[in-house]
Amino acid sequence: MPEEPRRQARGQRRMVQLLDAAAVVFAEAGYAKATTNAIARQAGVSPGTLYQFFANKEALAEALAERYRSELAAAHQKAFDPGTAQLPLPDLVDRMIRPMVEVNLENPGFKALFGSGDLPDKLTAPTRALQKAVTGRVAEVLAVRYPELPTDRLETTAAVATQIFAALLGTIVTTPATHRERWIAELNQALVGYLTPLEPS
Amino acid sequence: MPEEPRRQARGQRRMVQLLDAAAVVFAEAGYAKATTNAIARQAGVSPGTLYQFFANKEALAEALAERYRSELAAAHQKAFDPGTAQLPLPDLVDRMIRPMVEVNLENPGFKALFGSGDLPDKLTAPTRALQKAVTGRVAEVLAVRYPELPTDRLETTAAVATQIFAALLGTIVTTPATHRERWIAELNQALVGYLTPLEPS
DNA sequence: GAAAAATACGAGCATTTACTCGTGTTTGTC
DNA sequence: GACAAACACGAGTAAATGCTCGTATTTTTC
């Protein structure tokens, strides 16, 4: 079994380059149609070099998903002080949504790994992990706000909210910046509407 | 330019077989990974025969999308008498949703063409048509219920509602029948919540 | 019943694509 | 500076896949 080589500085830079390139190509073509050769070319590197760092296309996607996961975690960390969960519902939803939209705008590949349903079976694992990370965050917040809610109901709600978010994300990021707020407002309305019945009256 | 041959009875049966087969294979593999040879095999027919009836994979998908469109129209026709649009909102939403879920359960390929975002550019046309047909129906109903709403706002609302629906459709149909109602209820809650602000108070 | 049109076959072609491998260069270590 | 390990190249390979084409059979037309 081949063991991981000890990466030197140059190698680490290359890996970053390759992930950047993958994000671009995934964003343009979608995961399925994205070719490893195209990713290598985008990174200004030969196909052989790509495979020096990533065992296969799947591993590349996995690493990219991992990157997104940590960026998302950071963005949420920044937007959350304790007590946020007690804000009025519309404000809370807005606080959850903004950072995710931002991350998505800065990382065009995100949606390709997060959203689409037409992925080969092999990719379901990393994709699921990413989805689950997001759903988990949502569930945490909901747990604080609605402590009475049973766990399974909480998870269902978080899952649905995440799926609604994912569904509208595509429209939000592909829409020109001028009209973007419009769609963000719709997303807000949808989520607030969905969650309102849970509010203590 | 080759003109369409005048199909005889046998040929028409074959086309139905092929569309059925395509639905199965698309459902199992997704559009991108579905191979035309697999579709032919599923139909119990040689690859050459497939291409006697459909110019290419895209044309096959197009024809299938068209079939779904008409089935959906029929299902909605059946569920709609005039006056339905004036029902209480939860009932109206339920009436819109049920037939679509049914069509989806009976035609597993539907979601593969309707939902996923990772489709090659060539397929966007038929997919768009299908999405647009659904959105159009929703818009019609909304127009009757909310006659005061400006057209653009109406279209936005219909689009969002459709996307929410599409997002949860996957979960609904892949979930075992025993738990299905649970998710349908969530979808209802989401849509009702989204539309409630439009109700005259 | 003969000519024509439609249907059917399936081996195989052309292309794409994930990935390899032999070879050469750069970087770190002693 | 010598040796090894990491990095880099890019032509090439094996497999997959959309689709063709020559040929053979069935159905329709007259």
Image (cartoon, coloured by chain):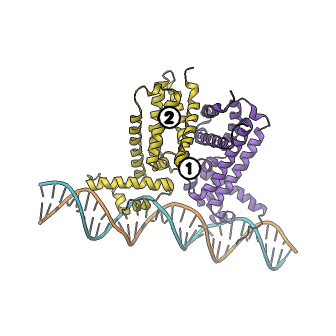
Chain colours: A yellow, B purple, C cyan, D orange
Q: Amino acid at mark 2?
A: Asp
Nearest to the observer: residue B138 or residue B67: B138
Residue B11's image quarter? bottom right
The residue identified by callout 1 is B117
Q: Nearer the viewer, residue A153 or B155?
A: B155
Residue at 42% in and 54% down:
A22
Mark 1 to mark 2 CA distance (whole Å)? 25 Å
Q: Which x, y percent locates residue D3?
A: 16, 62
Q: To which residue does mark 2 refer? A: A94
Q: Is residue A99 above or below residue B117?
A: above
Please indicate whether residue B75 sits to the left or right of residue B42 in the image. Answer: right
Residue A128 visible in the snapshot: no
SS at mark 1 in the image: loop
Compared to residue B146, the image places residue A200 above or below, namely: above
Question: Is label 2 in a helix, a strand or a loop?
Answer: helix
B56 relative position to A65: left or right: right
